[in-house]
Structures are given as structure tokens and as C-alpha cells.
Image: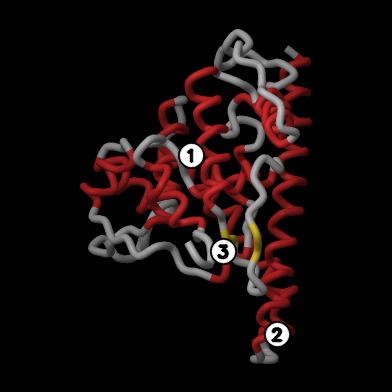
Amino acid sequence: MADGYTIGEVLNQLKEDFEDITISKIRFLESERLVHPDRTRSGYRKFTDDDVDRLRFILTAQRDHYLPLKVIREQLDRLDAGEVPDAQPPPPAFPGVAGEDADETNPHAASGTQQAGALAADDLGEPPSEVEMSVRELADASGLESADVRALREFGVLGDRSDDSSLFDAGDLEAARAARELLQLGLEPRHLRMYRQFVEREVSLFEQLVTPLMRQRNPEARRQATRQLEKLSELTTCLQSALLARALRSQLHDR
């Protein structure tokens, strides 16, 4: 390995042992400072073999021992210091039970918005990986029913709603898997339309801010626009998460 692995290459290495791993989860673990890939001048992540081993340790601790990220971080700190981490994991956390580490035990919980919304240079600088799937293939890969895939396309959540024959890409697969979990919790495809509408309004707002840079048509201006969009996404996602958490707490306490 001369130059390191891209995030997509790391995903392919881990996929065989961890079927639920996604690029979003790898980025989330990086945001929690559990893994520290290098960055190229263009902002792309480059992972070493040690980074991949570290991710395997984290994912195994979550899957096999139900360890929250707080405990995993402590174990990694011990490993970094040359110590042997504790062998005995704490009791498993039960889904749906709120607690101090509820958001850390399951990165799809309180931090789910951050995973889905926060962008990095990899997202903006590179198109989704070259995967093309039909309705049936996307349904099989995501666990959705074909009817749900079609409905989600109709409501603008997946693919091109103006073209029923268009194929789906890797970004659609990630969205489809998130949609599947939401549907399992009782939502319907039509309910998810509002997220597409939120995105369209947000993109329109961001466009106003970066248009002056994009009009310059030079590489440095485009890189600056990319960094600005990345920062905007990060901050608005953080704000949305905080507002949602506050509203949910208020609802729980009022009942």
C-alpha cells in the first residue's frame, strides 16, 4: 500500500465481516476521533492498514460486546498507550432505553442526522461509486420491497422521479437503507417526502452563498466553494440535531 486506501476501498475491505458498515458510519467514527486518516491536499481521506485494523476493533467491540463508544474510546486509549484493555465488556445496552451513552451505543440514533447530513470533501469532490441497480436489485440490497422503492422514487427520495427507467446508484442504496429503518418504525414513503423538500430548500439557500465563488471558474475558487459547502452542511446539521433533540425532550416531558 503506497498511498493509502480511499474510504471506498476501506468499505470494501470491511464489508465481508461487517455487512452493515457504510461510508457514513466510517465518517461518523472519524468524527468521534476514534480513527484518524490522513488527508490529501484536495481533502480526500487516506487510510493506513493500522486505520483499517482500528476500525475492525471498533466494529467488533460494538457488534460482539455491545460496547458504547465511550468505552471503546477508553480501550483504544489504553492500546495507544501500550496497555492491555479490559477483557470483560459491560452489560449490553438495550435498544430504545435512553441513557447517558444512548447516542454513542448506536451511531444511528442521536447522531443519525449528522451522518446523513454532514458532508466532507469526499462527498462533494467525487460522484457516488459506479454502481447501477434496477428497482429489484436496489430492493434486494436494501431490504425494501420493490413497491416501496417505486414509491420512494415517486416522492423524490430515491433516484430520478421523472424517469421510471433510470437506474439507482450507491447514494440511493445508502438512502434506501435509512428509509427501510424508518418504514419499519411505522412511517410511510409519503412521509419521507418532507426530507427531500428540506434538502431542496437548504440547497437553494447554500447556492446563494457559493454562487459568487462558482462564477469565478477557477480551481481555487471551486475548492473554496467546496469547503464552504462542507462547513455549511456541518453547521446546519448540528443546528438541526440540537433543535430536534430539544423539541423531542419537550414532548417527552410534557406527557
Residue ID at (66%, 23%): 84
Q: Amino acid at mark 3?
A: Asp
* View extreme (front): residue: 82
Residue beneath label 1, please?
191
Residue ID at (78%, 23%): 250
In-image side of 103 versus 5 (left or right): right
Figure colour scheme: secondary structure
**Residue 141, position as x, y percentages in the image:** 29, 43
Q: CA distance from mark 2 to mark 3?
A: 17 Å
Q: Earlier in the sequence, mark 2 or mark 1?
A: 1
Tag 3 and tag 1, C-beta contact below 8 Å = no
Q: CA distance from mark 3 to mark 1?
A: 29 Å
Element at label 1? helix
Q: Amino acid at mark 1?
A: His
Quadrant of res 247? top right
Query: Depth check: 225 or 8 in front?
Result: 8
Residue ID at (74%, 61%): 231
Residue beneath label 2, please?
220
Tag 2 and tag 3, C-beta contact below 8 Å = no
Q: Earlier in the sequence, mark 2 or mark 3?
A: 3
| Numbered badge on residue 205 | none
